[in-house]
């Protein structure tokens, strides 16, 4: 007789939550077909080895699964990295903290947002290319320290414009803003290879998309060719933004 208790119910629930979370992660990173293929393979492996008890085929699939784990880690290293970062990010613990009386700041500091918006719109008018990344829950320390120039300055419109001024030493890289301060500039970002990015968008847009796919950061892109302002967040673009659009998005995402 099969016994089914509370522990078994909890076990099924946790496995379901983990699978659902990875499903969302794969969907955001455009790897959903690979994820479904892995689930189908696991289902076939369980049927062959546990239900039908085919020893020869089951042993072959067992070997493939043991080797396949390493392949999955290599294939989805960026997604796994994002999952672990998100798991440890303090913002994910806010519901639990509120249960114990911890407060959350709901008001967004407009003094941190308006200089960014004003600088982006000014650069857009002059068709000065720019890529500004705003860190949120997932730390970007590795990008700042290994592929950028540390600055650590207050957010200032003129400073942002001077860094991205044509011919300036750091204008080709990305600026990273963290904790209401400009932490680094000239940073090299991971580039997205998604086929869904419109062909007319250049390398800055692909870099902005790349960092939004691998972290929860908000990337602001100013096109040097068209002067249009875009935002990449959670693996999606918001294109052709006005002053009010950019202010609204930053207010929402940084809140």
Image (cartoon, rainbow, N blue to C red):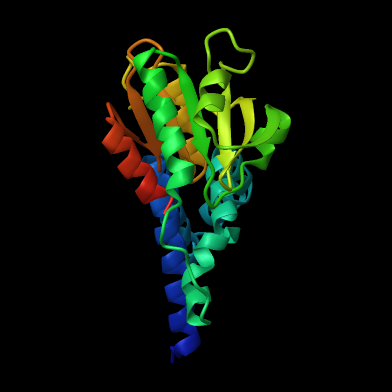
- Looking at the image, which residue is at 39% across and 48% down? 253
The relative height of residue 6 versus residue 40 in the rendered view (above or below) is below
Name which quarter of the figure residue 230 lies in.
top left
- Nearest the eye: 45 or 56: 45
- Nearest the eye: 205 or 164: 164
Q: Quadrant of the C terminus?
A: bottom left
Residue, far top: 167
- Looking at the image, which residue is at 62% across and 27% down? 185
Name which quarter of the figure residue 149 lies in.
top right
69 relative position to 28: left or right:
right
From this viewpoint, is residue 17 visible?
Answer: yes
Residue 162, horizontal then vertical, whole percent:
56, 19
198 relative position to 91: left or right:
left
Q: Quadrant of the N terminus?
A: bottom left
From this viewpoint, is residue 197 visible?
Answer: no
Residue 214, horizontal then vertical, whole percent:
52, 40
Residue 113, horizontal then vertical, whole percent:
44, 42
Residue 91, horizontal then vertical, whole percent:
52, 61
The relative height of residue 125 versus residue 104 in the rendered view (above or below) is above
- Looking at the image, which residue is at 52% across and 25% down? 158
The relative height of residue 14 versus residue 156 in the rendered view (above or below) is below
């Amino acid at each position: 007789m099969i016994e089914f208790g509370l522990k078994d119910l909890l076990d099924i629930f946790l496995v379901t939550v983990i699978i659902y979370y990875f499903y969302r992660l794969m969907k955001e990173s455009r790897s959903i077909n690979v994820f479904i293929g892995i689930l189908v393979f696991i289902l076939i492996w369980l049927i062959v080895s546990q239900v039908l008890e085919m020893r020869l085929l089951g042993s072959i699939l067992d070997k493939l699964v043991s080797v396949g784990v390493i392949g999955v880690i290599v294939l989805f290293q960026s997604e796994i990295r994002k999952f672990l970062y998100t798991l440890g990010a303090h913002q994910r613990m806010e519901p639990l903290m509120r249960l114990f009386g911890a407060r959350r700041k709901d008001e967004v500091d407009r003094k941190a947002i308006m200089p960014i918006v004003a600088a982006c719109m000014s650069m857009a008018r002059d068709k000065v290319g720019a890529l500004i990344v705003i860190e949120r829950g997932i730390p970007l320390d590795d990008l700042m320290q290994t592929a950028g120039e540390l600055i650590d300055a207050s957010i200032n419109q003129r400073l942002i414009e001077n860094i991205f001024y044509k011919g300036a030493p750091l204008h080709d890289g990305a600026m990273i803003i963290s904790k209401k301060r400009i932490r680094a500039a000239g940073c090299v970002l991971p580039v997205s290879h998604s086929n869904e990015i419109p062909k007319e968008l250049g390398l800055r847009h692909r870099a902005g998309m790349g960092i939004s796919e691998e972290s929860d950061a908000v990337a602001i892109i100013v096109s040097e060719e068209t002067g249009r302002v875009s935002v990449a967040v959670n693996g999606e673009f918001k294109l052709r933004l006005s002053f009010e659009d950019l202010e609204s998005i930053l207010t929402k995402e940084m809140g």
